[in-house]
Image: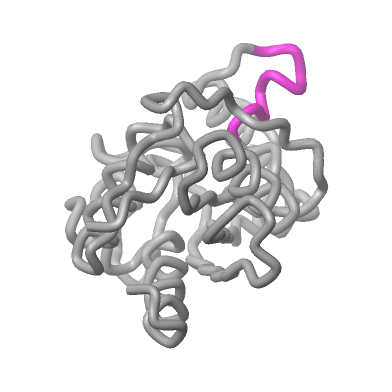
Amino acid sequence: MTKVVLASNNAGKLREFSAILSEAGLEMVPQGALGVPEAEEPHPTFLENALAKARHASRLTGLPALADDSGLCVRALGGRPGVHSARYAALAGGEKSDAANNRRLVGELASVQDRRAGYVAVLVYVESADDPRPIVAEGYWEGEIIGEPRGGNGFGYDPHFYIPALGKTAAELAPAQKNAHSHRAMALQSLLRALRARGGA
């Protein structure tokens, strides 16, 4: 197994990433277990933030690193919450929690008919901190926002993210089903193809 530092301490992400990447012989280790503090995420795009996080984790550990920057983009809100998805409520003076983020989102859409939204995931894999050829993979999962939460699985905005094609919210999907359809699953499969093409997995 090749040890790769995951530039995140999010337990949900670690589960999703490990379930898919273990098949390719990659052992994911969360950065917190290696004493790596979280990187700054000051950039306006998912790609720039993911690259910054990957280089930061690799520089401090000397290991290959994988980072993702992901979030929810709602059309009627001009793409918000976007890169600010994890701290959407906090930016408005609320607490930093999934529940608070969902309350703000649902409140902003209360009188909006167009509920179309998409989960975006951008992954960046670097062999080293100065890797001149980072692998970039992206996934996009289409859905819409519903007012009442449904389901007890998942995290983030999953209870309000409804997928018409499946007739369920992301939080109503079993982990294996979510891993087959989600934005991260799409991005991870794309990443695996790129790694194999390069001979890295």
- Above or below: residue 45 compared with residue 201: above
Quadrant location, the C terminus = bottom left
Q: Is residue 58 left or right of residue 191?
A: right
Q: Residue furthest bottom?
A: 197
Residue 77's spot in the image, x, y percent?
76, 49
Is residue 80 inside the magenta stretch? no
- Above or below: residue 92 compared with residue 21: above
Quadrant location, the N terminus = bottom left
Is residue 87 inside the magenta stretch? yes
Q: Residue furthest front?
A: 62
Give the magenta range.
Answer: 86-94
Q: Nearer the viewer, residue 93 or 70?
A: 70
Q: Is residue 166 left or right of residue 65?
A: left
At x 80% / y 37%, what residue is drawn? 42
Q: Nearer the viewer, residue 127 or 178?
A: 127
- Residue 94, can we see it? yes
Residue 58's spot in the image, x, y percent?
56, 45
Q: Nearer the viewer, residue 109 or 13?
A: 13
- Residue 149, can we see it? no
- Above or below: residue 137 compared with residue 103: below
At x 29% / y 63%, what residue is drawn? 167
Residue 61's spot in the image, x, y percent?
50, 37
